[in-house]
Every structure is written in C-alpha cells, then in structure tokens.
Amino acid sequence: MKVGRAWIYMALLVLTVFYLLPVYVLLLTGLKSFAEADLTRMWNWPTQPSLAAFAKAWEKLSPNFMNSVYLVIPATLISSFIGSINGYILARWRFRGSEILFPAILFGMFIPYQSILIPLVRFLQFVGLYGSIPGLILVHVVYGIPITSLIFRNYYASIPGELVEAAKIDGASLLGIYRWVMLPLSQPGFAVVAIWQFTQIWNDFLFAVTVTNKPAQQPITVALQNLAGSQIVEWNVQMAGALLAALPTLLVYIFLGRFFLRGLLAGALKG
Amino acid sequence: MEERPLDPAPTIGAPGVAERAVPVPRWLQAMREIRHRLESGLPVLLITPSVIAVLIFVYGFIGWTVYISMTRWNDVLPDYTFVGLRNYIGLFQTPRFQADIRNVVVFTTLFLLGAIVVGFFAALLLDQRVKGETFFRSVFLFPMAISFIVTGIAWQWLFNPQTGINLLLKYAGYTGPLPRWFTDPTIMFGVKAGAIQVGIPVALIPVVIAATWQLSGFTMAMYLAGLRGIPEELREAARVDGASEWQIYRHVVLPLLRPVTLSALIVLGHISLKIFDLTVAMTGSGPGFATDMPAYFMFETTFRGNHFAQGAAIATLMLLLVAALIIPYLRYSLSRETEL
C-alpha cells in the first residue's frame, strides 16, 4: 500500500482522539475542585488536581456500588452455570423438539424487555422479591439463559466428538461426560460467559430502575443517573461518579479483553 | 462452525459385556432398565427448568403484556375489562407517540449509517498492517464495556451548549451562532403531518454521535474479523490481473463483506429500536419530544403515570418491530449453520 503510511496513522490518531475524548473529559473534570469545574473553564487543567470529587462521589455512591457487587457476583455465577448445562445439552444431545427449542430460547435475548416488564413487576411483587437485590438476581439469571446457553452451546460444539465417544465407550454417563470431559475443558467458555454477564448486569439500567424502587436497594447505574439529575449540579462529582461506575467493567475489559470480544461476536450469532 | 455430532439418545448403560458371562439376576436387569430410562430422559430433565423459565418469563409474560394492552387498565388498580384495540388507536393519535415513531426511525437510520461507516473505516485502517494494532483496537472497542448511563453523562457534558464542543469552537475563533445541540427544537426538512413535524430533529444528532461512539467498535470488530477471513490469494489473484487496490476493495473485498454488514445492521438495529438508557441519561424527552423514544414513553406512562394498558400497547408494538427484524435473521443464521 502506497497510500502513504502517514495518512493511515493520522486517521488512526483522529479516531483515537474521538474515542478517548469522553474519558479525558470525565477524568479532567473529576480531578477539579467544585469552584474550577464550571462551564467556562471546562477544558482548563485543574490548578491543583485532587481526588476530593472522587471521595465525595464514593461517599454518595458506595452503598449502590456495593449493591451492584452483591447483584453481579451471584447472578454471574448462577447464570454461567445454568448456561453451561444448557449449552452442553443443546450441543450434544438430540431429543424430540430440540431443533425448535434452540431458536425459541434464543429469541428471548432479542426481545425488548419492555414487553415483559409489567408482568415481571407483578410477578416479583407477588412472590415478595420486588424492590430487592435477590429479585434482580433472579431477573438477570432468567433473562441471561439465552445468551449464556448460546455461547456455551457453540463452545461445546467445537469440542471434538471423539472425546465424547471415547468417554462413552469407557462407560461414562451423561453427567459423567459433563463432569469429567466437558467441565475440565470449559474454562475459556466460562471466562467468555462470565465476563459477558458481568458487563451486562453491571451496566443494566432498565431492569434496575423498574425492579428496585428504594434508593437503598438500587444498583450503581440508577444511583448515578439520580446523582446526575439532581438539582445542584456538581460537575466534578458527577464526572468522578461516572468514572467510578465504569471502573469495574473497564478493568475487566483492560485485563480480559479478548474474552469480552468473543462474547460480543457470539451475540451476533457468529459462534 | 463445526457440525455438531448427531448423537442418538444416549446408549450408555445398555446391555453389554456383563451379560455374556453369567445370567443376570432379574433385579439387576430392572435396575439397568431404570438407569437406561433415566439416562435417555436426563437431557430433557436437565434442560427443563430453563425451558419452563423461558416459557413463563418470555412467552407467558409477552402474552400477558399483549392481553394488558387490550384492557382498560390505565390506572393504579388492575382492570382487565377487554377493550380491543382501543389503546392502540389512541396511541397512534397521540402526538408524543407520533414523534416517537419519527425519532426512532431517524435515530436508527443515522446511527446505523454512523456505526457502519466509522466501524468499516476503522477496520480498513487496522487491516493495513499498522504498528500498535492491538492498542488501537482496544481503544476503539472499550466504549462497549461501559454503560449507556456513563456514556450519556459524558456526552451530555460535551454537547452542553454553554461549554464542551461549543467552547472549543469559540477557542478556534468561530464567531457565528453556536449550535444548540440537544436543546434545539428545530426539525430539519420538517413537513407538517398532523400534530407533528416529520423530518430530522436536530436534537437527535448528539445522541446519534454518542451511540456511534459507544457501538461502532462492534462493527469494527466484525468487519476486521471479516477482512481477516478473506484469503490473501484472492486479493493476490486480482492484483495479478492488474486490478488497483481500490478496485480490489470495490469488487473483491466489499461483496465478500456483505453478510457481515447484514449481521451488524440487524444486531445494532434491534438495539437501536429499543434505545432507552442513553436518552434517559443524555436528554430525556428533549425539547418538544425531539429526542423522546418509544422505550422512554413506555417507561414513563407505565411506571410514572400508571397507564399500564397504554404502556403495554407501546411494548407490544416495539416487540413486533424487533420481531420483524430478528425472526428472519434467526432463521437465516440457523439454517446457514446446519448447511455448513
């Protein structure tokens, strides 16, 4: 290619600026004092960078941050485990109706959740889980079934059939094959699914805002939105809070990005 | 995609070696029979809880919602009196809902265009064997790991008419009237149709930019995977035939990327039709409902206004829209999978 390497790098640089600009602005404003974080001096550097805004944001958001932690850990673990079982069965076993079953389950990950929200809220009120973190865990586990089953199904389908055949000849049962053949080979599958679910659940807003009504029970996304919409606009605290809310998934992305990408492409049914 | 082995019902535990030697006692045979039955029923048994959950929480709840949409339940207390399509007719006569349809169509079109163009361009650049490819790829993709709420807050600050980008325009010496971004009630190319103006709401443009920022990494990743999947021999052959690099892209690469474009359009398209968090955090309904969306209207009318039947009607229409996009796609991808 003789288009001029310089132009290629120039274009890449422009794109990099575009993608990093919002994070730069969050960081810049988050490091400022209340007085300096005003509209006319938005792009100025802080004269005395301080973490005071972060401390204040943490003070306001930490209970909700912890709610998200208590939500995301069990929900991710349970839904990964369920997805693994379903994926194994969908990939390896044929029974009557199994070819209709798979697309019927998959459809559940594309629906607009608005179309189930009213019955969901009624149901949660009925069973006494409305407004609670366990209620939200249940919701994320159930609506996580399609994507987690899909990723695991594709993953298990790529494990050579000979391995399973060999185990069968050795007399392993269905669960034996799962326990002794599939599960030990499952770490990459679990990594992809767990990271995907972690990111989705941590970032969810729609379920969080409809299922939890009391501030004390709300996950971080709802609390952040309330903080940003409050009457007194402390830009520095808002931006610091946004960064705090983004931090867990950003860290996961930075350290385990390749698994994240695989989950992303699986969502496009690319296997 | 590898073909999955067509295992018949499991036959483990079937009569085997043991029989040949000694006559098997009847109780053992019975035990084996039970075990065999259990084994062949086990896959169904294990997947049953999930199937029941999906049946109830997806299909059952959808049915319930559709039913609510045809009742009189527009107050706090449930009222399941059947009223047919009255809520739907009322909805289409509501200016706010008319604006929502306009907004979601305009938003989806512009956003898909943005995500495809930016993502494809980024993938093309990364495909030129550049140094630091991993770094650039990570940077272009990281917004996908962030919530729409965070994105909305950051871009709202950037597009705040009193600061952000406008301040940069001032620094650059621009003295004309500054854009009002998401506070601008203007409808571009507006044509009056009933109570609303049909056209492009200017206030939507910042939202389109924010959404493109967040999701174009996805198209980039898909296109890059597509580009890497094209055998170098194909390009080489075209080169030998005297094709220019531009012609190779135009006549060899682009046609091969068509399925990728289709997948990206459908996946991003269905996200876009459901868009909720981003507008909540960034603009809300906007001036004169210029950035209002069906999902936001549904949320407000249902959970803030207690108009459950109206909310259910909006939800049902959203579902129909998404289903029209997703069902053909599911059939297409799954049938292609079995062919391979």
Image (tube, grey):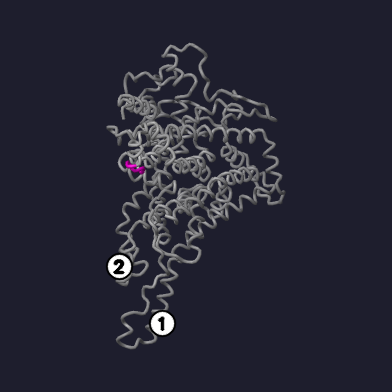
Q: Position of residue B208 (x, y in %)?
A: 50, 31
Q: Position of residue B85 (x, y in %)?
A: 70, 46
Q: CA distance from mark 2 to mark 1?
A: 27 Å
Chain holding disc 2: A
SS class, disc 1: helix
Res. B204 image quadrant: top right
- Decide whether residue A94 is among the magenta residues: no
**Position of A201 relative to B120 (above/below):** below
Secondary structure found at label 2:
helix
**Residue A60 makes an appearance in the image:** no
**Residue placed most toward the observer, A223 or B38:** B38
- Identify which amino acid the numbered label 2 is placed on: Ala
Q: Amino acid at mark 1?
A: Ala
Residue at image position (36%, 57%) is A156
Residue under numbered circle 2 = A166
In the orientation shown, which residue stands out farthest toward the bottom? B23
Magenta region: which residues? B229-233
Q: Residue at x 42, y 17 (%)?
A: B168
Q: Residue at x 47, y 27 (%)?
A: B156
Apparent side of residue B102 relative to residue A8 in the rendered image (left or right): right
The answer to whether tags 2 and 1 share a subunit is no
Magenta-colored stretch includes residue B230:
yes
- Mark 1, Cα crowd under 10 Å, few <14 / some 14-19 / many 20+, is few
